Image (cartoon, rainbow, N blue to C red):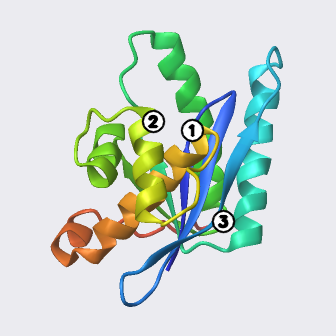
Amino acid sequence: MIVLGIDPGTATTGYGVVARAGDGAVSLLECGVVRTEPGTALPLRLRAIFEGVAEVIERTRPEVVAVESAFYAKNARTALVLGHARGAILLAAILRDLRIAEYAPAEVKSAVCGTGKATKEQVQFMVQRLLRLRTPPQPADAADAVAVALTHCYAAAVPAYAAMRAPAPLPRFAP
């Protein structure tokens, strides 16, 4: 199974592509970020995020896209803008008929670090250790995205948990 993990952001959207073998072994295929230009209008940034994620999907052919879910920010505007970025990401995935799974930030941190209050540095360190990498993925947004993908791989490995979290079937729309 190939999983594309996404850490949404309007300035930097991290992505990580992880393969899970039949025996449960996980390996990193690639990771990176989609960056948008500061000061650019939001619609243009959303287009860049959509196109960047779509290009990663076309290149890596994942079976599932795992996205970090929205969190409740202290600043309502920040949460709203992040929601727009998530929408662009979800649209890129669903237009390619991919299953989508969403995980809360604390759930991702708990899955890879053992605590939902882990720091970005702790997530980078654990991603490095879990995937036996020489160095942690850089930047931190890419490491966070790899952690999202790993969370889905681990959830899929536990049948009862996977059944609870199974993505809904894709709706079919009649013209």
Q: Is residue 41 above or below residue 127?
A: above
Disc 1 secondary structure class = helix
Toward the bottom, the furthest residue is 22
| Camera-side mark, 1 or 3 | 1
Residue depicted at 60% across the width and 72% down the height: 62
Disc 3 secondary structure class = loop
**Where does label 3 land, which residue?**
175
Instruction: Look at label 2 and name its amino acid.
Output: Glu
Instruction: Look at label 1 and name its amino acid.
Output: Ala
Is residue 19 rendered to the left or right of residue 61? left
Cα gap from disc 1 to disc 3, whole angstroms: 43 Å
Q: Are marks 1 and 2 in contact (CB under 8 Å)?
A: yes
Q: x, y percentage for residue 74?
A: 38, 11
Residue 168 in view: no
Cα gap from disc 2 to disc 3, whole angstroms: 48 Å
User: Quick one: quadrant of the C terminus?
Assistant: bottom right
Q: x, y percentage for residue 65?
A: 53, 61
Instruction: Look at label 3 and name its amino acid.
Output: Pro
Is residue 111 rendered to the left or right of residue 147? left
**Where does label 2 land, which residue?**
121
- Mark 2 nearby-residue class (10 Å; few <14, some 14–19, many ≥20): few
Residue depicted at 67% across the width and 74% down the height: 61
Residue depicted at 33% across the width and 44% down the height: 109
Is residue 125 rendered to the left or right of residue 163? right
